[in-house]
Image (spheres, helix red, strand yellow):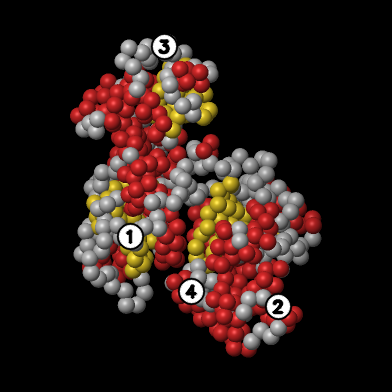
Amino acid sequence: MEFPGELQATFVPDEGGFAFWGLAEPVEAVRALGLPEGRAAECALAVPDGDRVGPARVPSRVVELDAALPALRALPEDARLADSLRAWRRAARLLDDDAGDPEFADLAAAMPAAAHAVLDAEQDAIRAPDALLGLLRSSAGLGRALDRAGIHAELRPYQRSGLAWLTGLAGGGVLADEMGLGKTLQAICLLATREDGPHLVVCPTSLLGNWRRELEKFSPRTPVVVHHGPGRELSGELEPSTVVVTGYPVLRTDTAALTGIGWGVLVLDEAQQIKNPTAQATRAAARITARTRIALTGTPVENHLEELWSIVTVTNPGLLGSRARFRERFANPIRQRGSASATNRLRGLLGPHLLRRTKSEVATDLPEKLYATVACTLTGEQARAYTRAVDRAFGDGFGSGIERRGRVLALLTTLKQICNHPVQAGAEDGELTGRSGKLDRATEMLAEIADDGEHALVFTQYREMGELLARHLAGQLGLDTVPFLHGGLPVAQRDRMVERFQHDPDAAPVLLLSLRAAGFGLNLSRANHVLHYDRWWNPAVEEQASDRAHRIGQRRTLTVHTLVTAGTIEDYIARMHESKRALAGVVSGESEVSALAELGDEELHEVLRLDPAGVR
């Protein structure tokens, strides 16, 4: 058999397999090797260009790892192959033989440049052969490990690559993928496939319910313990597969109990919570004993170097030296002089321990829209108002017929408004911060989006809530004003808002919109985030609103964030949307009220009563 000697092979972790390239149309050559033909892709590789080597998007055939490895092992010894293919044939056979580090080190030392031509995260250098072989070794067993763990998710190639990176970490690291790329899912897969637990997840209190639900959804075999609330106690022997989820406030108060356990993996979610090295949470996190320490953050870490030092000092103690030494070697030269040499030295130190992917880098593998459900909690004030509203409505009774429908509608409206903010539901006005879990979470997200230089649309179905948001966000984001486009504005004023948001470089990064007034006909493609602040029963209405940004002219992946207050009527709506059953699958407008009104009081109470797990 004739083998195509010009065909090159490179392992591309973020594509989830091997890229075969070097020919204008590599598919026939791939078939000739006995490989599955894979899929067409343009991979970012370093290739010869005259007298130099430079980055390029190279036409390739990408064959998934599990399919490529057996075919590579089977290539005959006398085949006429490029050196890169010979190297990966050797790597596949070493994996099959369960070879040790010395054999892979020898292969790395002899690996030709074409075999590791895939660009690194900064897109200005190729991956080191030993690092690429390490990722291959971590990736090769992932499929079997995920199957054994019973993971209920189909990971995208870049997520598999991230999981392989997490699996291969020595000591710890920072997963700094951009918001919306699935850091939580990657961490859950790591926890589920590690058998040296128990494991500990620390997150903001508002995310406790989200972590519990995500673990139950994606890894249903994993025992989950939420360590929070009065009477909490970690008693008895925890199973090795158990994941304990707790909040940063509890980490501070229960440090002694938590440091008394030898954890397998420590996950620090929203790691900006430990960006201050003198804070109690940071000191407590540093005292936790764990074999692997992972920080998750979507905040661009290179913009705040001393905050980065604080986080990395928790995940990888000693890596960046003392704080004073870090300032001297890195922070001051980079901040004051823009020192390229200091930047490169820092990259070299962090490279094995920090993984950052952006949507633009993995856009070829992402759908045009990403969907993220953001779980929020009720504050004590909200929980009391919610319970009172439910108890009062059921105490008064709903009547029958049209009267029952009207009273159910009134209760639903009140409960939705309480989830938004107590002030919208008639509570005393004043300071808004700290009174609504949803408002606080939305503010955090929008501040992060603005800090990233990105833009967001925020939809609400209530004009009063839009006005509260406009007032609150202007103060929190340091803006003169946050525009709110709603049905009460003249058409000319709406048009000016749209024009400014789309084209004015000095415009606010956030545009608030009424769901109904702005759900049709507008082009707002400058936004690459959509945030649905409150829920509409019919998912098509939300989809139409999201499409204001998902239009011709949108060059970036759009992330649609839907805020859901856990344990409330919003949780019920979210489940209906996801399952495409009952109300969300069949209703339009207000017919969901009729469906709920037809339920008996006991069934209706089961839907509307507050689940205490959603209260912070």
* Residue 389 x, y percent position in the rendering: 58, 82
Label 1 vs label 3, nearer the camera: 3
Mark 1: give few (<14), some (14-19) or many (20+) Cα within 10 Å. Answer: many
Q: CA distance from mark 4 to mark 3?
A: 67 Å
Please report contact status of discs 4 and 3: CB closer than 8 Å, yes or no. no
Q: Which residue is mark 3?
A: 1
User: Which mark is on residue 611?
Assistant: 4
Q: CA distance from mark 4 to mark 2?
A: 24 Å
Q: Visible in this render: residue 475?
A: no
The amino acid on which the numbered mark 4 sits, given as a three-letter code, is Asp
Q: CA distance from mark 2 to mark 1?
A: 44 Å
Mark 3: give few (<14), some (14-19) or many (20+) Cα within 10 Å. Answer: few
Q: CA distance from mark 1 to mark 3?
A: 53 Å
| Label 2 vs 1, first from the N-terminus | 1
| Label 2 vs 3, first from the N-terminus | 3
| Label 1 vs 3, first from the N-terminus | 3
The amino acid on which the numbered mark 1 sits, given as a three-letter code, is Val
Nearer the observer, 36 or 498: 36
* Residue 493 x, y percent position in the rendering: 76, 57
The amino acid on which the numbered mark 3 sits, given as a three-letter code, is Met
Q: Which residue is mark 1?
A: 243
